[in-house]
Structures are given as C-alpha cells and as structure tokens.
Amino acid sequence: MRLLRSIAPLVLASTLAGCATTVMEVRQKGPDPMHVAMYGPHPDERFPLPAMDISKVNPKYFRQQVAYQTMEPPGTIVVDTQERFLYLVQGDGIAMRYGIGVGKAGLEFEGAARIGRKAEWPRWTPTQNMIAREPERNLKWAGGMEPGLTNPLGPRALYLYKDGKDTLFRIHGTSEPWSIGKAVSSGCIRLFNQDIIDLYGRVPTGSRVVVLQHHTPVEEPGPMAASDGLVPPAAI
C-alpha cells in the first residue's frame, strides 16, 4: 500500500508533464508571427494593400539577411535569375535577400545597369514583344493599365537604364504572389508586394544593379532582418 502511495505522485507528475509538452507543440504550429507581421497589411498605401497569405510560401523566399560573398560594393542589387533570389549587398559579407519570380523579359538582360527611375504605384504598359507573345492577355492594355492592386507591376517599380537608355528591364511587385520562386510567362523580376516596398525604400535612384543569368551564389542563412528601419525613398 505504501508503495502504491509513493508511485501515484510520480505517475501524476509524468502525466501532467506529458500534457504540458503536448500544449507546447500545438502552440508552435502555424506561420512564424514575425513573418506574419512582415507580410501584413499596408493600410496607408494609395491603394490599401492587404496582408499576404504566407501559409503556402516556401520560407526560403521570405525576406531575410544572409551571408553573401561578392566583390560588389554595398548598395548594389544583384539579381540571380537562376536561383530566384535578389540580393541587396550590405557589406561585411552580408546581404538582404528577397525571393523573386522571373518572367521571360527577365531572361533577356544580363550585366550591369543603374536604377534610372523609381515609381510608386506605376502604370503598366506591355511591350510589343509581350503583346505579340500573348495578344489575348496583353493587347487590351496596349495603351497602359492604371495603377492598382491588380496591376502587374504592383505597388512599386524600379526601372533599369544602361548608357542613359531604358533597358525595359523592371524590378517590381506582383499581383500573383504564388509566382515567387518560379519561372513565369511574362514580366521581368517580381517580388512580393511587401518586399518591393521594402527594397524601394532602401535603394536610391542611380543604384547599381547586376543581373546574373547563370550563377550560383555563395550564401548561408543568417539572422532575420527587421522589416523597419528603412531609409526614405529617393525622389523620382
């Protein structure tokens, strides 16, 4: 009888510990709250931007700081179309990395350029090549599409120039977040809308951009960067 009395408290404690462990595991399920906040709504935008559903996004495409070895100076944007990443070089072997989707136009430029223009909630006008390639989708927008949540360029666009001429290469947001990390039928380099807003605020007009078509970066995941602390956008 004494033996049973001494064992009973141990059994009860073990059972309670098991319950506590189960509760802890349940609480850990679901998206990381930091990512939920990072890709939350932007109600103060010209067109209020809703939160993004991140439940089906591969976490490697979320905005984050990584170790990145490059000879490019801080402030340079490096676009790796093959790996589906865009890097903003920060110096000391660190870069801010963004997941990207690459359209056919994004595969038509390689080398160095400069951000010649920046635009908030830009109009979108398909190129002649885009109209010829997908007339049923793009011909009706030959005169341009007004800004808005369904505009293919999203809330921000960076226009690349070389030798003073527009390359027709764009870094922009997207109304199709599912396309990040994939090769898509149209467009240039697209980021999540929340990410293009972040990048737009970090780079001024004139920033160097290097587009790599066949390159594998040297990188290792590092600490997650905060989503605030942005520098003011440069004037267009």
Image (spheres, helix red, strand yellow):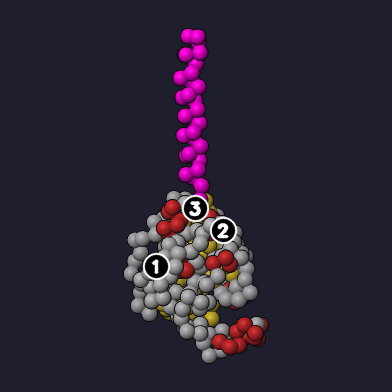
CA distance separating discs 1 and 2: 21 Å
Total marks in image: 3
Magenta: predominant secondary structure element? helix
Instruction: Indicate left or right for 102 with 198 as reference.
Output: right
Extreme residue toward the top, this view = 2
Residue under numbered circle 3? 31
- Disc 1 marks which amino acid? His
Numbered disc 2: secondary structure: loop
- Magenta stretch encompasses residue 208: no
Residue under numbered circle 1? 42
Instruction: Indicate left or right for 104 with 69 as reference.
Output: right
Q: Is residue 37 above or below residue 27?
A: below
Residue under numbered circle 2? 56
N-terminal of the pair, mark 1 or mark 2, is 1
Magenta-drawn segment:
1-30
Q: Decide which of 199, 214 is in the foreground and name it.
A: 199
